[in-house]
Amino acid sequence: MEVKKIFLPESEMPRRWYNVMADMPTPMEPPLHPGTGQPAGPEDLAPIFPMNLIEQEVCQDRWVDIPEPIMDKYTIWRPSPLYRATGLEKALGTPAKIYFKNEGVSPAGSHKPNTAIAQAYYNKIAGTKKLTTETGAGQWGSALSMCCALFGLELKVYMVKVSFKQKPYRRLMMETWGGKCVASPSTETAAGRKILEQNPDSPGSLGIAISEAVEIAVASDDTKYALGSVLNHVMLHQTVIGLEAQKQMEMAGDYPDIVIGCAGGGSNFAGLAFPYIRDKVNGKDIEIIAVEPTSCPTLTRGPFAYDFGDTNQMTPLLPMHTLGHTFVPEPIHAGGLRYHGMAPLVSQLVMDGLIRTESIPQTETFQSGIDFARSEGYISAPETNHAVAMTIREAKKAKDEGKEKVILFNWSGHGFVDMAAYEAYMLGNLSNHELPSDEIKRALSDIDALPKPKQYKAGNL
Amino acid sequence: MEVKKIFLPESEMPRRWYNVMADMPTPMEPPLHPGTGQPAGPEDLAPIFPMNLIEQEVCQDRWVDIPEPIMDKYTIWRPSPLYRATGLEKALGTPAKIYFKNEGVSPAGSHKPNTAIAQAYYNKIAGTKKLTTETGAGQWGSALSMCCALFGLELKVYMVKVSFKQKPYRRLMMETWGGKCVASPSTETAAGRKILEQNPDSPGSLGIAISEAVEIAVASDDTKYALGSVLNHVMLHQTVIGLEAQKQMEMAGDYPDIVIGCAGGGSNFAGLAFPYIRDKVNGKDIEIIAVEPTSCPTLTRGPFAYDFGDTNQMTPLLPMHTLGHTFVPEPIHAGGLRYHGMAPLVSQLVMDGLIRTESIPQTETFQSGIDFARSEGYISAPETNHAVAMTIREAKKAKDEGKEKVILFNWSGHGFVDMAAYEAYMLGNLSNHELPSDEIKRALSDIDALPKPKQYKAGNL
């Protein structure tokens, strides 16, 4: 009998995170202070993050030890199993071997707890009593709520209003774990009230929700802010995914020709891909693909520029691919991956030619999710379906070319609480939205006056 | 670092199911033909089940080989991990060691696919083209839908109307896998129309839904019926849970003093417990506890009697604990475990004194689920919370008595699609319903005229 799942024993879990900064061909350009435009220092971040996480944000060491209390909590769901997608291979009739890393086994159902548990821990030992955060589809908010429960921290989550309404189950998960969740924009903050004055019916956006969460964190000494993606330390924590996968692929006796992850802020993609970026920098012939929705085409169409992480211009300026901090995807887009920016680390690696970028329309992603469910059993999160769809494209290509490619993708989460989006697709209510160039240009006009990175590159409009 | 999860390698998966009938102190009394009242033979079941499953239903062999194609599909989620609930132990400050078998890792999120995959396979090789079934909370219907997709069978699911309305996500899961799902009672069957004539607002019940599914199966040669619990072959298939657990407990270096499962029709309980029943019959000192809701107290208050499996009196009469085939639990009860009867195998083992029975009110079960989520991370299905609540009771008792008990329970499924029930609890909208004796007596009056088993025992009214 062929082995379907490759389990790594807990004793073989990676004990260090991998920091891709140590192996990047081009050094990162610094974040800039939002007011002065000068490089931001640790003190600029101190009002919102504890110093131990700020140190990780700028750390250049290749390896960072994982503290024992984090290892202990990781064992609740880690190491996650690596699967061979034999059912999908047969359904496609492809000679490709398809593997996926199942991050849906965590209690929150996605990869997000990999960094949530670390951030809760570092805040706990730094004396933080309460965290604030934003969440879009709710995966991050629920993950952080679970991890705050495990470390005894209070939590307040600002959830993008359109998702708050569409995804009550995610909110209820947060509350089951003890977190408080409000729809953003809310009347609780100056940032929220400002948006509501301009547009009382605002569906919200991650950029707005971040402004609200940051405002609350800044206002109180024992309250800090936590971000679920984009930042360097988040990418660092997620590398447990790829480090485990490398061991498991070795156990399976294969090495991937192609590594695939979906990308919104970049964290699940980076988690799987960065350890393989290291291999690639060291000479391995491997293709690494980040997949995003055509309706939020940050990597494929946005410029590489300095931009704010939030709508209200409170965060430092980050060098990244962006659609502009006022960008809000069309409500017709059913899934996550809606953030206007992209992790600076991922953005820089795209600039360096180490990552291929692709965008896929949503109807193809949902159909791919259904094909996957009917051949492999598991129902994927809508975000994850972007990786599934790209995998199917590459597996079909391998079939056409008669090549025995090895494909590895990150199954970043399950879709149990996203069934309403599947219903919309099955009822034929979803269509695709190719963003017109002038829509992107409008959103990007807000960043025209900002400083430009040395490597500035115009978007693909 | 203490090991949190015990993984059994796929190569160590049990290759035979365990048949408890071979070790029961009292032989089972036979099912009776619903018309004649005489012992029912294989030919009586042939209109609704394929002959290979009917043979399993009456099989007396201790061990039954698991066919290779079923083993192959089992690897999609099996062996399921055994967890040590260290977080819950610490939260309770108990000296008890708590283990749980995580059946929530299956694509459908519960233990149900263990038999669904077997039933789909046996029907497939017997030439069945289409299956019909009933489902209550939706766990069974979604599990069978997933498994029919994997074996290329059509499926029609009659879903209890109150759940159909409350749990749209379960219906959408069925549809994602390709199954068709309708609310029961429906106008598609004579059984459904009869109920609707009497009560157009009927919330439905498992008994009614079974009548509808059986009626459709009987009417067509290539259509068969599948039942998710109660029957002997279902219990047989579920024993993979306990057989794996026995190997994993040995790997952990422990043996359980107490084994706990929640019981509706009895299948997840039996799956974990029956291999331990064998140990108990062979002299092991072990307590085995079946837990049910106080609002559907089949084992704790129902008589041991002959009764129909369905409301419309179409199925054979089974010797079991029952609340009467017209029993419908109060709508105030939020969880599953609503079936009027109980697996004859479980019922007989209760009669033989090998199983202790307990009932727990629903508010205690939900609070236990929240305590579990905040200490162990995982959100349980409302059904599963009955086992969690019983485990917490026993762990507290061990603390009071200062005893280092080893407790093993079946974590039969996750609660991702049951968050509305958690919301009802958190909002204070759930109360407990202790069934008045006259309510039970009314439902039981329908079975007064039926034949009585030799071991007939009156209920606890």
Image (tube, coloured by chain):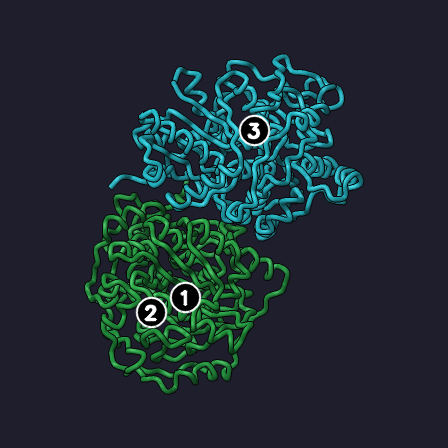
Chain colours: A cyan, B green
**Which residue does the numbered mark 1 point to in the structure image?**
B263
Asked if badges 1 and 2 are on one and the same chain, I answer yes
Q: CA distance from mark 1 to mark 2?
A: 9 Å
Between the residue at mark 3 and the residue at mark 2, the CA separation in whole angstroms equals 53 Å
Which is more toward the observer, B1 or B62? B62
Residue A247 percent across, percent down from the top left: 36, 30
Camera sees residue A438: yes
What residue would you read off at disc 2? B346
- Give the residue number, with chain letter if any, for mark 3: A233
Residue A362: x, y in percent?
Answer: 53, 37
Gap in Å between the C-alphas at discs 1 and 3?
46 Å
Q: Are marks 1 and 2 in contact (CB under 8 Å)?
A: yes
The three-letter code of the residue at mark 3 reads: His
Name the side, left or right, on which A444 lies relative to A110.
right
Outermost residue toward the right?
A197
Give the total of numbered labels: 3
Type of the residue with mark 1: Ala
For the point 25% across and 74% down, the residue is B28
Quadrant hosting residue A438? top right
- At x 75%, y 40%, the residue is A192
Left or right of B118, for residue A134: right
- The vertical placement of A247 against B388, above or below, is above
Residue A75 image-quadrant placement: top left
Q: Residues within 10 Å of mark 3 (few under 14, many from 20)?
A: many
Residue B423's place in the image compared with A12, above or below, is below
Tag 1 secondary structure: loop
Q: Chain of mark 2?
A: B
Which class describes the residues within 10 Å of circle 1: few (<14), some (14-19), or many (20+)? many
